Image: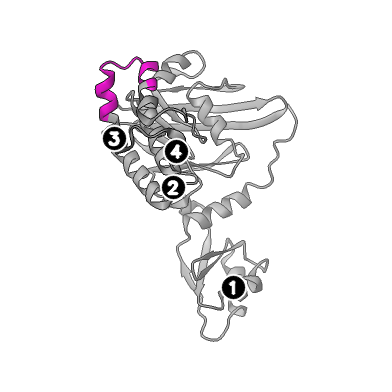
Protein backbone atom coordinates (compact mmCIF):
# COMPACT_ATOMS: atom_id res chain seq x y z
CA UNK A 1 0.00 0.00 0.00
CA UNK A 2 1.20 3.52 -0.80
CA UNK A 3 2.51 5.64 2.03
CA UNK A 4 1.72 9.31 2.55
CA UNK A 5 -1.47 11.23 1.89
CA UNK A 6 -4.01 10.48 -0.84
CA UNK A 7 -5.71 13.81 -0.11
CA UNK A 8 -3.79 16.77 1.29
CA UNK A 9 -5.76 20.02 0.91
CA UNK A 10 -5.49 23.17 2.98
CA UNK A 11 -7.76 26.16 3.48
CA UNK A 12 -10.12 25.32 0.60
CA UNK A 13 -12.58 28.13 -0.10
CA UNK A 14 -15.33 28.15 -2.72
CA UNK A 15 -17.60 31.08 -3.44
CA UNK A 16 -20.47 31.15 -5.91
CA UNK A 17 -20.85 34.87 -6.48
CA UNK A 18 -21.36 36.39 -3.02
CA UNK A 19 -22.30 33.02 -1.47
CA UNK A 20 -19.52 31.24 0.48
CA UNK A 21 -20.16 27.50 0.07
CA UNK A 22 -16.91 26.19 1.61
CA UNK A 23 -14.85 28.27 4.00
CA UNK A 24 -11.31 27.12 4.87
CA UNK A 25 -11.49 23.30 4.81
CA UNK A 26 -8.39 21.15 5.50
CA UNK A 27 -8.25 17.38 4.85
CA UNK A 28 -5.19 15.15 5.24
CA UNK A 29 -6.27 11.61 4.38
CA UNK A 30 -3.75 8.71 4.17
CA UNK A 31 -3.81 6.18 1.33
CA UNK A 32 -5.81 3.00 1.87
CA UNK A 33 -8.27 4.34 4.47
CA UNK A 34 -12.06 4.69 4.42
CA UNK A 35 -13.24 8.07 5.70
CA UNK A 36 -16.80 9.22 6.33
CA UNK A 37 -17.69 12.77 5.34
CA UNK A 38 -20.63 14.01 7.39
CA UNK A 39 -22.66 17.15 7.84
CA UNK A 40 -26.16 18.54 7.30
CA UNK A 41 -27.53 19.25 3.82
CA UNK A 42 -25.93 22.37 2.39
CA UNK A 43 -22.85 22.09 4.62
CA UNK A 44 -20.46 22.03 1.64
CA UNK A 45 -19.64 18.30 1.36
CA UNK A 46 -20.37 17.92 -2.37
CA UNK A 47 -18.58 21.17 -3.24
CA UNK A 48 -15.50 20.02 -1.28
CA UNK A 49 -15.49 16.61 -2.98
CA UNK A 50 -15.64 18.30 -6.41
CA UNK A 51 -12.74 20.61 -5.58
CA UNK A 52 -10.64 17.68 -4.34
CA UNK A 53 -10.99 15.73 -7.60
CA UNK A 54 -10.52 18.75 -9.87
CA UNK A 55 -14.11 19.04 -11.12
CA UNK A 56 -14.49 22.46 -9.54
CA UNK A 57 -11.94 25.26 -9.36
CA UNK A 58 -11.22 26.58 -5.88
CA UNK A 59 -11.72 30.25 -5.07
CA UNK A 60 -8.65 29.95 -2.85
CA UNK A 61 -6.67 27.28 -1.03
CA UNK A 62 -4.23 24.67 -2.24
CA UNK A 63 -3.35 21.03 -2.09
CA UNK A 64 -2.81 17.72 -3.79
CA UNK A 65 -4.89 14.66 -4.56
CA UNK A 66 -3.02 11.41 -5.33
CA UNK A 67 0.16 13.52 -5.46
CA UNK A 68 -1.17 15.90 -8.16
CA UNK A 69 -1.92 19.59 -7.71
CA UNK A 70 -5.71 20.03 -7.55
CA UNK A 71 -5.58 23.19 -9.68
CA UNK A 72 -2.83 22.57 -12.22
CA UNK A 73 -2.98 18.79 -12.66
CA UNK A 74 -6.69 18.02 -12.34
CA UNK A 75 -6.65 15.91 -15.53
CA UNK A 76 -4.32 13.38 -13.89
CA UNK A 77 -6.56 13.26 -10.79
CA UNK A 78 -9.75 12.62 -12.79
CA UNK A 79 -8.25 9.61 -14.61
CA UNK A 80 -7.20 8.02 -11.30
CA UNK A 81 -10.43 8.74 -9.40
CA UNK A 82 -13.87 7.15 -9.34
CA UNK A 83 -16.65 9.61 -8.45
CA UNK A 84 -20.17 8.38 -7.73
CA UNK A 85 -22.59 11.30 -7.63
CA UNK A 86 -25.69 11.61 -5.42
CA UNK A 87 -28.01 11.29 -8.40
CA UNK A 88 -27.86 8.20 -10.63
CA UNK A 89 -25.91 9.56 -13.60
CA UNK A 90 -25.72 6.68 -16.08
CA UNK A 91 -27.90 5.90 -19.09
CA UNK A 92 -31.40 4.69 -18.25
CA UNK A 93 -32.21 3.42 -21.74
CA UNK A 94 -29.08 1.21 -21.91
CA UNK A 95 -28.73 -2.18 -20.28
CA UNK A 96 -26.29 -2.77 -17.41
CA UNK A 97 -23.80 -4.36 -19.82
CA UNK A 98 -24.17 -1.55 -22.39
CA UNK A 99 -23.56 1.06 -19.68
CA UNK A 100 -20.37 -0.68 -18.56
CA UNK A 101 -19.16 -1.16 -22.15
CA UNK A 102 -19.70 2.55 -22.81
CA UNK A 103 -17.71 3.51 -19.68
CA UNK A 104 -14.95 1.03 -20.64
CA UNK A 105 -14.62 2.78 -24.03
CA UNK A 106 -14.44 6.20 -22.35
CA UNK A 107 -11.50 5.01 -20.25
CA UNK A 108 -10.01 3.08 -23.19
CA UNK A 109 -9.80 -0.04 -21.03
CA UNK A 110 -7.92 -2.85 -22.84
CA UNK A 111 -9.58 -6.33 -23.15
CA UNK A 112 -12.91 -4.60 -22.75
CA UNK A 113 -15.19 -7.66 -22.90
CA UNK A 114 -13.13 -9.51 -20.30
CA UNK A 115 -13.08 -6.47 -17.98
CA UNK A 116 -16.84 -5.95 -18.28
CA UNK A 117 -17.44 -9.67 -17.58
CA UNK A 118 -15.20 -9.49 -14.48
CA UNK A 119 -16.94 -6.34 -13.23
CA UNK A 120 -20.40 -7.86 -13.71
CA UNK A 121 -19.33 -10.93 -11.74
CA UNK A 122 -17.60 -9.00 -8.92
CA UNK A 123 -20.66 -6.84 -8.30
CA UNK A 124 -23.18 -9.69 -8.68
CA UNK A 125 -24.70 -8.11 -11.79
CA UNK A 126 -24.20 -10.86 -14.38
CA UNK A 127 -27.74 -12.30 -14.09
CA UNK A 128 -29.21 -8.80 -14.66
CA UNK A 129 -26.74 -7.61 -17.31
CA UNK A 130 -29.39 -7.35 -20.05
CA UNK A 131 -31.85 -5.35 -17.95
CA UNK A 132 -32.37 -1.71 -18.87
CA UNK A 133 -31.02 0.61 -16.14
CA UNK A 134 -34.30 2.56 -15.79
CA UNK A 135 -36.07 -0.67 -14.77
CA UNK A 136 -33.70 -1.31 -11.84
CA UNK A 137 -34.51 -0.68 -8.16
CA UNK A 138 -32.47 1.87 -6.20
CA UNK A 139 -30.17 -0.81 -4.79
CA UNK A 140 -29.33 -2.29 -8.23
CA UNK A 141 -28.84 1.16 -9.76
CA UNK A 142 -26.42 1.91 -6.95
CA UNK A 143 -24.55 -1.33 -7.65
CA UNK A 144 -24.35 -0.49 -11.36
CA UNK A 145 -23.01 2.99 -10.55
CA UNK A 146 -20.35 1.52 -8.24
CA UNK A 147 -19.33 -0.96 -10.96
CA UNK A 148 -19.05 1.85 -13.51
CA UNK A 149 -16.90 4.15 -11.34
CA UNK A 150 -14.51 1.40 -10.17
CA UNK A 151 -14.08 -0.57 -13.43
CA UNK A 152 -10.99 1.42 -14.48
CA UNK A 153 -9.24 0.58 -11.17
CA UNK A 154 -9.09 4.06 -9.58
CA UNK A 155 -6.73 4.77 -6.68
CA UNK A 156 -9.34 7.00 -5.00
CA UNK A 157 -13.09 6.48 -4.75
CA UNK A 158 -15.32 9.47 -3.92
CA UNK A 159 -18.90 8.53 -3.02
CA UNK A 160 -21.49 11.27 -2.51
CA UNK A 161 -24.34 9.92 -0.35
CA UNK A 162 -24.29 6.63 -2.27
CA UNK A 163 -26.86 4.77 -0.14
CA UNK A 164 -29.59 7.43 0.10
CA UNK A 165 -32.96 5.82 -0.56
CA UNK A 166 -31.90 2.15 -0.69
CA UNK A 167 -33.02 -0.63 1.62
CA UNK A 168 -30.93 -1.83 4.62
CA UNK A 169 -29.78 -5.06 2.91
CA UNK A 170 -28.57 -3.13 -0.17
CA UNK A 171 -26.74 -0.70 2.14
CA UNK A 172 -25.03 -3.56 3.95
CA UNK A 173 -24.01 -5.22 0.67
CA UNK A 174 -22.71 -1.90 -0.62
CA UNK A 175 -20.53 -1.37 2.46
CA UNK A 176 -19.16 -4.91 2.23
CA UNK A 177 -18.08 -4.04 -1.32
CA UNK A 178 -16.48 -0.74 -0.18
CA UNK A 179 -14.41 -2.62 2.41
CA UNK A 180 -13.43 -5.25 -0.18
CA UNK A 181 -12.16 -2.46 -2.46
CA UNK A 182 -10.34 -0.84 0.46
CA UNK A 183 -8.68 -4.13 1.39
CA UNK A 184 -7.38 -4.26 -2.19
CA UNK A 185 -5.71 -0.85 -1.71
CA UNK A 186 -8.36 1.67 -2.79
CA UNK A 187 -8.75 4.88 -0.75
CA UNK A 188 -12.42 5.79 -0.12
CA UNK A 189 -14.06 9.06 0.96
CA UNK A 190 -17.82 8.66 1.39
CA UNK A 191 -20.35 11.30 2.38
CA UNK A 192 -23.32 9.97 4.33
CA UNK A 193 -26.15 10.95 6.67
CA UNK A 194 -26.32 7.52 8.33
CA UNK A 195 -24.62 7.15 11.73
CA UNK A 196 -24.21 3.38 11.38
CA UNK A 197 -22.31 3.98 8.11
CA UNK A 198 -20.10 6.60 9.75
CA UNK A 199 -19.19 4.01 12.38
CA UNK A 200 -17.87 1.69 9.65
CA UNK A 201 -15.21 4.26 8.66
CA UNK A 202 -11.61 4.52 9.86
CA UNK A 203 -12.14 8.22 10.52
CA UNK A 204 -14.89 10.82 10.20
CA UNK A 205 -14.71 14.43 9.04
CA UNK A 206 -17.69 16.60 10.03
CA UNK A 207 -18.61 19.73 8.08
CA UNK A 208 -21.14 22.40 9.09
CA UNK A 209 -21.80 25.81 7.54
CA UNK A 210 -18.94 25.26 5.09
CA UNK A 211 -16.35 24.72 7.84
CA UNK A 212 -14.60 21.63 9.20
CA UNK A 213 -15.96 21.26 12.74
CA UNK A 214 -14.16 18.08 13.81
CA UNK A 215 -12.38 15.01 12.50
CA UNK A 216 -11.07 11.80 14.02
CA UNK A 217 -12.16 8.28 14.95
CA UNK A 218 -15.70 7.72 16.25
CA UNK A 219 -14.28 7.29 19.75
CA UNK A 220 -12.22 10.52 19.52
CA UNK A 221 -15.23 12.55 18.38
CA UNK A 222 -17.48 11.23 21.16
CA UNK A 223 -14.77 11.94 23.77
CA UNK A 224 -14.12 15.45 22.44
CA UNK A 225 -17.81 16.37 22.39
CA UNK A 226 -17.71 16.76 26.21
CA UNK A 227 -21.25 15.39 26.28
CA UNK A 228 -22.88 13.70 29.28
CA UNK A 229 -25.80 11.42 28.37
CA UNK A 230 -28.43 9.72 30.54
CA UNK A 231 -31.03 7.26 29.37
CA UNK A 232 -34.38 5.96 30.64
CA UNK A 233 -36.57 3.23 29.19
CA UNK A 234 -40.25 2.39 29.30
CA UNK A 235 -43.69 3.52 28.17
CA UNK A 236 -43.45 6.80 30.07
CA UNK A 237 -40.45 8.18 28.17
CA UNK A 238 -42.52 10.10 25.63
CA UNK A 239 -44.19 12.06 28.43
CA UNK A 240 -40.83 12.55 30.09
CA UNK A 241 -39.31 14.06 26.92
CA UNK A 242 -41.53 17.14 27.11
CA UNK A 243 -40.91 17.40 30.87
CA UNK A 244 -37.12 17.75 30.47
CA UNK A 245 -36.81 19.54 27.12
CA UNK A 246 -35.44 23.07 27.54
CA UNK A 247 -34.79 22.62 31.26
CA UNK A 248 -31.46 23.62 32.91
CA UNK A 249 -28.51 21.53 31.71
CA UNK A 250 -30.48 19.77 28.95
CA UNK A 251 -28.89 20.40 25.55
CA UNK A 252 -30.93 17.89 23.57
CA UNK A 253 -33.37 15.00 23.88
CA UNK A 254 -33.57 12.06 21.45
CA UNK A 255 -35.46 8.77 21.15
CA UNK A 256 -33.64 5.50 20.52
CA UNK A 257 -36.29 2.79 20.20
CA UNK A 258 -38.11 2.70 23.54
CA UNK A 259 -35.29 4.60 25.27
CA UNK A 260 -34.91 8.32 25.78
CA UNK A 261 -31.45 9.93 25.64
CA UNK A 262 -31.02 13.24 27.46
CA UNK A 263 -27.68 14.99 26.99
CA UNK A 264 -25.90 18.09 28.19
CA UNK A 265 -22.49 19.58 28.94
CA UNK A 266 -23.02 20.67 32.56
CA UNK A 267 -23.22 17.60 34.81
CA UNK A 268 -24.53 19.42 37.88
CA UNK A 269 -27.38 21.15 36.05
CA UNK A 270 -28.27 18.05 34.03
CA UNK A 271 -28.38 15.72 37.04
CA UNK A 272 -30.36 18.32 39.01
CA UNK A 273 -33.02 18.43 36.27
CA UNK A 274 -33.19 14.63 35.91
CA UNK A 275 -33.53 14.15 39.69
CA UNK A 276 -36.75 16.18 39.56
CA UNK A 277 -37.97 14.48 36.38
CA UNK A 278 -38.82 11.00 37.56
CA UNK A 279 -41.88 8.76 37.62
CA UNK A 280 -42.64 5.62 39.62
CA UNK A 281 -40.27 2.78 38.73
CA UNK A 282 -38.23 5.00 36.44
CA UNK A 283 -34.46 5.14 36.60
CA UNK A 284 -31.97 7.39 34.81
CA UNK A 285 -28.74 5.59 33.85
CA UNK A 286 -25.60 7.31 32.56
CA UNK A 287 -24.44 5.88 29.22
CA UNK A 288 -21.65 6.64 26.78
CA UNK A 289 -22.98 9.21 24.28
CA UNK A 290 -23.73 7.82 20.84
CA UNK A 291 -22.23 9.28 17.68
CA UNK A 292 -25.66 10.72 16.91
CA UNK A 293 -25.78 12.45 20.32
CA UNK A 294 -22.35 13.93 19.60
CA UNK A 295 -23.33 15.18 16.14
CA UNK A 296 -26.51 16.83 17.43
CA UNK A 297 -24.33 18.64 19.98
CA UNK A 298 -21.82 19.59 17.26
CA UNK A 299 -24.58 20.99 15.05
CA UNK A 300 -25.84 23.13 17.92
CA UNK A 301 -22.35 24.34 18.84
CA UNK A 302 -21.61 25.28 15.21
CA UNK A 303 -24.38 27.88 15.51
CA UNK A 304 -26.29 29.64 12.78
CA UNK A 305 -25.14 29.45 9.17
CA UNK A 306 -23.43 32.81 8.66
CA UNK A 307 -22.56 32.28 4.97
CA UNK A 308 -24.51 35.35 3.95
CA UNK A 309 -24.23 37.22 0.67
CA UNK A 310 -20.85 38.84 1.19
CA UNK A 311 -17.37 38.64 -0.32
Q: Secondary structure at mark 4?
A: helix
Is the stretch drawn in magenta largely helix, strand or loop? helix
**Cα distance between the residues tagged 4 and 2:** 30 Å
The residue tagged 2 is 198
**Which residue does the numbered mark 1 point to in the structure image?**
238
- Work out whether mark 1 precedes mark 2 in sequence or the reverse, and give the earlier one: 2
> What residue appears at the point 59 percent right and 69 percent down from the top-left corner?
270
* 2 and 3 marks in contact (CB < 8 Å): no
Q: Nearer the viewer, mark 3 or mark 1?
A: 3
Left or right position of 278 against 108: right
Q: Residue furthest right?
A: 309
Gap in Å between the C-alphas at discs 1 and 4? 42 Å
Do labels 1 and 4 touch, CB within 8 Å?
no
The magenta segment is 102-118
From the image, tell me which residue sits under label 4: 135
> Would residue 159 be visible to someone looking at this image?
no
Choose between 29 and 92: the one closer to the eye: 92
- Using a 10 Å C-alpha cutoff, classify the residue at mark 1 as few (fewer than 14 neighbours), some (14 to 19) or many (20 or more): some
Q: Is residue 66 magenta?
A: no
Quadrant of the frame with the N terminus: top left
| Along the viewing direction, whichever of 173 and 38 lies nearer the viewer | 173
> Which of pointers 4 and 2 indicates the residue nearer the eye?
4
Q: Spatial distance from mark 3 to mark 4, Cα to Cα?
A: 16 Å
Please give the name of the residue rendered at 49% of the width and 19% of the height, measured from the top-left corner: 70
Instruction: State which mark lies toward you, 1 or 2.
Output: 1
Q: Residues within 10 Å of mark 2 (few under 14, many from 20)?
A: many
Amino acid sequence: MKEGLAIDVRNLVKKFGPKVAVNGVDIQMPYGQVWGFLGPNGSGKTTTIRMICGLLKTTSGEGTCLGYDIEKESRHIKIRTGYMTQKFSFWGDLTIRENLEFVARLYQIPSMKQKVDETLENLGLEHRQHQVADALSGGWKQRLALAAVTMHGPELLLLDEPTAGVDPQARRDFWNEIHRLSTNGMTVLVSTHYMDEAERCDKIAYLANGKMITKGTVSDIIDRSGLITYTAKGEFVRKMASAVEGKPGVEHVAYFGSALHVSGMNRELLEGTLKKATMDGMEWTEVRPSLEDSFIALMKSSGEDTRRHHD
